[in-house]
Image: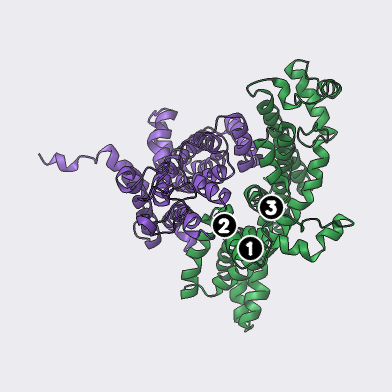
Chain colours: A green, B purple
Amino acid sequence: MSHLKAVASRTLQLALVLWAVVTILFLMFRLMPGNPMAAYIDPTFTVEQQQALMAQFGLDKPLWEQYFIYLGNLLQGELGQSFRYREPVAERIFALLPNTLILTFSSLFVAYAFGILAGAYLAWRRGSAVENAAIPLVLMTRAMPEFWLGMVLLAVFSFWLGWFPAGGTRPAGADYDSLWALYTSRDFLSYLALPALTLAIYSQGLPLLLMRSNMLDVMKEDFVTMARIKGLSNWTVVVRHAARNALLPVMTSFAIAVGYQLQGNVVVESIFSWPGLGRELVNAVSASDYPLAQGAFLMIAVVVILMNLIADMLYALLDPRISHA
Amino acid sequence: MHDLALQKPGLVGRMFRSLKLPLSDPFAVFGLAVYATFLLTAIFADAIAPYDPTEILYTPEYELASDLRPGEQGFILGTTSLGRDIFSQIVYGTRSALIIGITAAFMVALIGSVVGLVSGYFGGWVDAVLMRLADIAFGIPFLPFVIVLAAFLEPSIWNVVLAMALVLWRDTGRVIRSQVLTLRSRGYVDAARVCGSSDLKIILRHIAPNILPLSFLYGSIAIGWAILTEASISFLGFGDPQSISWGYMLQDAFASQALAKQAYYWFVPPGICIILVVSAGFFITRGYENLLFPKLGR
């Protein structure tokens, strides 16, 4: 029962965090230097459009009243009109979200599959020359700027070897019947390969190091010693008994990694001209498209906060020993 | 005369000793050596760099010295498309990287330590408020936040420092708080309280010195974060166009088709410098972990 209560209180807490982030965003965009209406109204909009937006966001009302109108609009998914695209921000953002999620999840699946196996292997080979060389190398990959790694991969695999296209999601002029047809096409995979590899190389360090240190801890536990005493084979002990238990915290870190990954996406999407949320945020900020910038930021923040919540819940679910004191 | 020998070491000496530099770990020593090298390069940049990093250079034949390969015409690492010396840019880039890295790390470590000390020591509603603030900071995606901030502020290297000070104290603050929670119930703290020490004195004299290594540890992680963030921001074009940084060099190279030209000599060295400085921070951190948490036995 306390379990349910803990989940509820944690959800409430994160709802408060979300509210705080939304408020910070409101203040940032309204208190910026210059015309307070610039957050929603572009001078090139027609008079009717300007008046419609004035009414919708209450831009002629006092700040506190605007704040409540803003919250109300948010709850209805109303984020205003993009200056550049002349279409609702919410539509634009939901159209880009799948691209970002596909990139994030495909790179993280590769990173976690590799990181878990390599981490378990390194724990098993503890103290060997392989381990001594691998750990500093893994730390080095964590120290790389992701966009630099992307640049090197582009220069080698795209410009020199010509194996992969340099950017985008589809060949010029190609048209697909549906998004599904695009995402399942061979071309799409070749466009996805380099940005996903870039992000995967950067992210494999976290699961690898976590898996390794968990394995080292678990191998010292009594039940592993017991399994050895029972005369079970080395393979059975390592895989069936130790690895399964070491895996739990690594799996919960996946949700956190999704949140961190969304930050890395900002630069990697820009390098590979990947039409996702991060690149849109950068372009919107450079072009002073404030409603779009606000919407893209908010979407990224929502995913980060949601992933923090999921990580917490998974943690409690997978390891019942965690108390909710 | 002999009471001179009993004299306590000076304040600087005591501070240095309480940092507990991990000098027995070879990787940590390597990290400290990398820091020292880059620090010297930054200080003596004027003497080391053969050219002004923003100067447009010409060959003796009065042609623009653009896109020269390493070694050509005596340019150690070649030149950029605009005829600027890449080696000199690397050297001066060290300066802006370290200025940002050290100030941002100092801010993060300072704010995080103060929050952790106050939160952990006083507990109660102060603790509740500060930790909710930390929760909010954890809900802010950092790099997007810096980008949005850059939209409203003049392009400057200090935006990164400001954003880090506003957001990244959260990790340091939480860790130090939990450390303070275990420290404040120790016998010597109770003893100090019984002797009538004020809260401020207890915090500064008895608790703060014990968390100093942790602050330093998080500070050295923050140096890496700051340098990586500055590089990303400059790369995306929100940096200060007046100051040469490694991120700016990478942006310049990317925008000037260095990838298609296969000009590895242009965009590989700045990346290597970033990796060296940031991983040096990681190695020092690892050395500290062995020292602070010997039970981990890594």
Rounded to the nearest angstrom, the CA distance separating label 3 from label 2 is 29 Å
Question: What residue does disc 1 label?
Answer: A158
Mark identifier at residue B259 = 2
Residue visible at 43% across and 29% down? B200
Residue at 80%, 26% in the rendered image = A45
User: In the drawing, does residue B245 fall left or right of residue A267?
Assistant: left
Q: Residue B84: percent from the left, percent from the top?
A: 43, 47
Instruction: Read off the chain for label 2.
Output: B
Asked if residue A29 is positioned above or below residue A159 in the image, the reply reads: above
Could you tell me which quadrant the C terminus of chain A lies in? top right
In this rendering, the label closer to the viewer, 3 or 2: 2
What amino acid type should be assigned to the residue bearing mark 3? Answer: Val
The residue lying at 68 percent from left, 32 percent from top is A288
Asked if labels 3 and 1 touch by Cβ distance under 8 angstroms, the answer is no
* A107, B14: nearer the viewer: A107
Does mark 3 fall on the same chain as mark 1? Answer: yes
The total of numbered circles placed on residues is 3
Please tell me the numbered disc located at residue A258: 3
Helix, strand or loop at mark 1: helix
Give me the C-alpha separation between circle 1 and circle 2.
9 Å
Q: Residues within 10 Å of mark 3 (few under 14, many from 20)?
A: many
Q: Amino acid at mark 2?
A: Leu
- Residue type at numbered disc 1: Ser
Whether residue A258 is visible, yes or no, is: yes
Residue A128 seen anywhere in this rendered image of the structure? no
Please say if B246 is above or below B159.
Answer: below
